[in-house]
Image: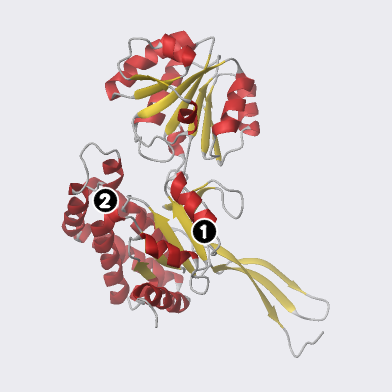
Amino acid sequence: MLTDTEQIFQKTFSASKSLQRFSDDEIQDLLLAIANEIEKDMASILKANKKDVSKMAATDPLVDRLLLNEQRLQAIANAVRKVSDLPSPAGKLILKRNLKKGLELKKMTVPFGVIGVIYESRPNVTFDIAVLCLKSKNACLLKGSRHAEETNKKSVALIQKVLKQKNFAPECVSLLPSDRKTLEKMFTATGYIDLIIPRGSQQLIDTVRKNSLVPVIETGAGVCHVYVHKEAQIEKALSIVVNAKTSRPTVCNAMDTLLIDKTIASKFLTLLKEDFLQHKVEIYADQKSFSLLKGYPYLVKASEDDFGKEFLSLKCAVKVVNNFEHAIDHIQKYSTKHSEAIVSENKDICEQFMSEVDAAVVYANASTRFTDGEEFGLGAEIGISTQKAHARGPFALEKLVCEKWFVRGDGHIR
């Protein structure tokens, strides 16, 4: 006898097949209706979100990731509309040829089928994943965290309501229980789930990668560096570093480690600590930068572990490097291959950095905070892929398909 979770798997699998019968225009109409319903039902979503937020300590840095307000909900609705306007990646002709014996051969893009996404705390991800999967004609199984349980329940109920209204199977988007046992069931659901995408901490990603029998695409964890080269323009570098750390510290594209060339370290850090003080940034400093930052009230001596840490808060590591090669070596050792940046007026050095650093996104004279599907014009995203197979960087609509061969004959045998 099937468990409740297995019944959800089965219903979502069946729903994924029915999705193929709908036209791109019908799916676009569905997504627009979801956007309208978000705007119409903001009060109910915010009420559910308030219940989730009330269970957390006000000082917990995860509150910012969990919190919804009217502005954020409006941004979600706007993002849904942007996705609705994008061309579907499914059903595209990649190759067509006639073989010698007269067989007609085509290669097309097709949906994966059922995509399971495991994510933490951020309720906006529920809408992002649902609409991206629907647009690409994939069904999805959503495994959110207990911290966002009420918000996720309300959000999926809203989406399923619109699916029913538009004559789609409501199980095209399904919410799974938030307990750990559900994870274990997802890992072995090879008959129902075609792909699992973890989005969250390195611990979550490692757990999924090590235990899942279902194919996995990793997204999320970022230990992002900004390297201020000796030929950096100081004011430009300050602006980039402060933005990369403080504009939204709880997201994966925020700066975690600042590297500074020793020839400008004293001048740069003297100015930076004034900006960081306004935001109460806690600095984990190596020996050299610790001496240069003396008197800064939120100063801690860094341990080795601090240079490979994704802080997800108003904390960052700082290290003074001897030269360009020293900076590259440090990034190579500690990077999670998410987003890495250099600030320099030397164009050749910038090009060398971008060529040599192995990361999904590399920047010259820009904040790492731009690593985002919507910022890159891709619409909403599933996450930031840090691996090299299938998708890398902002993992958005265009990558939610695989390939399928179609061969037509007339009694051909071999």
Mark 1, residue position: 211
User: How far across and how far down the image is residue 24, in percent?
Assistant: 45, 70
**Residue at image point 34% right, 36% down:** 248
Question: Which quadrant would residue 169 be assigned to in this image?
Answer: bottom left
Residue 362's place in the image compared with 400, above or below, is above
First-in-chain label (1 vs 2): 2
Quadrant the N terminus occupies:
bottom left
Task: State the SS at label 2.
Answer: helix
Mark 2, residue position: 74
Q: Label 1 neighbourhood size at 10 Å, few (<14), some (14-19), many (20+)? A: few
Position of residue 281 in the picture relative to residue 292 (left or right): left
**Residue at image point 42% right, 62% down:** 183
Position of residue 101 in the picture relative to residue 28 (left or right): right
User: How far across and how far down the image is residue 336, in percent?
Assistant: 53, 39
Callout 1, which amino acid?
Asn
Q: Nearer the viewer, residue 297 or 33?
A: 297
Distance in Å between CA atoms under marks 1 and 2: 37 Å
Determine if residue 17 is in view: yes
Question: Which quadrant would residue 360 be assigned to in this image?
Answer: top right
